[in-house]
């Protein structure tokens, strides 16, 4: 159709992806490049696919990285807060140090990302995508810290969206809420069970589509939310969960 926006078009856009060495973060970085964008990946550990060594819980790291992006590229069009950790444990098994560590990475790290990316994003208008979870929409008795942190991410997203809507051009902010996605995090969660293989089967069995999600599926939704095709979407929690939250 003449004049239509390509859904996956990120041509010339500069996008920062935290957690870029993880299964989902790496897939998002690849999808951004496939859509014509410039993907800058950050993570705690270095590597060929990581542009910045980055502890998302440290303000100084955010200040250093956003300054480097401004110096090298002169702009930032999008931020994906994909860095996160998951710890299995109910209320009786979760100590305060673990609680604080999970909240620090998943919620504080997302807050700091939104805060320090905002000045660059405001220059031309931009988009933030936060990785929440279906466990940020519903509770979990066995992953209490993770669920609480992701619930915080979802409401932080709405608040950032309302703040960003005041600017001209606006800065949009949305959250993606995946169910179990095949990759290292699910492997680690399953490894905490007595029978990891059975645990993985149970994860898939809980999902109406009867399988785990794929990192590339999350990446595709992320690229859409970063693109101009989603210009009227902000403040949304978007499940990508095989129908899990439809029950």
Image (cartoon, rainbow, N blue to C red):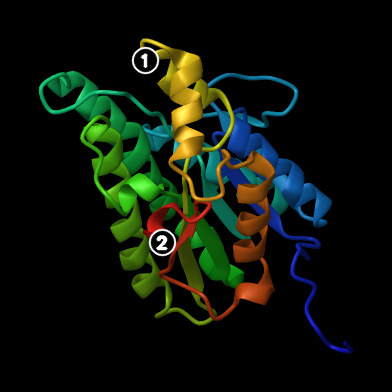
Q: Quadrant of the N terminus?
A: bottom right
Residue 47 point in image, percent of width and height: 69, 20
120 and 228: which is toward the camera: 228
Left or right: residue 207 compared with residue 144: right
Number of residues whose C-alpha sits closer than 10 Å to that of mark 1, classed few (under 14), some (14–19) or many (20 or more)? few
Relative height, residue 38 to residue 237 (above, below): above
SS state under label 2: helix
Tell me what residue is drawn at x 46 percent, y 41 percent: 63
Relative height, residue 67 to residue 75 (above, below): above
Relative height, residue 217 to residue 165 (above, below): above
Tell me what residue is drawn at x 75 percent, y 23 percent: 48
Residue 21 point in image, percent of width and height: 62, 28
Left or right: residue 236 compared with residue 104: right
Location of residue 150 by image quarter = top left
Number of residues whose C-alpha sits closer than 10 Å to that of mark 2, classed few (under 14), some (14–19) or many (20 or more)? few
SS state under label 1: loop
Q: Which residue is mark 1?
A: 193
Tell me what residue is drawn at x 79 percent, y 48 percent: 33
The total number of labels drawn is 2
Location of residue 98 by image quarter = top left
Residue 95 point in image, percent of width and height: 15, 19
Left or right: residue 230 compared with residue 234: right
Q: Which residue is mark 2?
A: 246
Location of residue 96 by image quarter = top left
For marks 2 and 1, give the CA distance: 26 Å
Task: Say if residue 161 shows up in the picture.
Answer: yes
Label 2 or label 1, whichever comes before in sequence order: 1
Kindly check if marks 2 and 1 are in contact, taking CB atoms under 8 A apart as contact.
Answer: no
Number of the label disc, if any, that sits on residue 117: none
Relative height, residue 198 to residue 168 (above, below): above
- Residue at far top of view: 194
177 and 192: which is toward the camera: 192
């Amino acid at each position: 159709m003449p004049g239509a926006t390509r859904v996956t078009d990120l041509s010339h856009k500069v996008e920062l992806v935290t957690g870029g060495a993880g299964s989902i973060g790496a897939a998002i970085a690849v999808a951004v490049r496939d859509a014509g964008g410039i993907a800058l990946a950050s993570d705690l550990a270095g590597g060929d696919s990581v542009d910045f060594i980055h502890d998302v819980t440290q303000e100084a790291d955010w200040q250093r990285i956003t300054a480097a992006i401004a110096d090298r590229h002169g702009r930032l069009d999008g931020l994906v807060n994909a860095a996160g950790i998951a710890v299995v444990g109910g209320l009786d098994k979760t100590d305060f140090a673990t609680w604080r560590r999970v909240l620090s990475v998943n919620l504080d790290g997302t807050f700091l990302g939104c805060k320090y990316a905002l000045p660059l994003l405001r220059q031309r208008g931009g988009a933030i995508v936060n990785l929440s979870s279906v466990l940020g929409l519903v509770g979990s008795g066995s992953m209490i810290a993770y669920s609480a942190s992701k619930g915080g991410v979802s409401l932080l997203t709405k608040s950032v969206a309302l703040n960003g809507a005041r600017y001209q051009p606006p800065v949009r902010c949305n959250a993606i809420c995946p169910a179990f996605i095949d990759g290292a995090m699910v492997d680690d969660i399953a490894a905490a069970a007595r029978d990891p293989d059975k645990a993985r089967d149970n994860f898939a069995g809980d999902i109406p589509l009867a399988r785990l999600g794929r990192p590339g599926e999350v990446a595709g939704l992320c690229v859409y939310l970063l693109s101009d095709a989603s210009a009227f979407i902000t403040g949304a929690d978007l499940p990508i969960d095989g129908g899990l939250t439809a029950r």
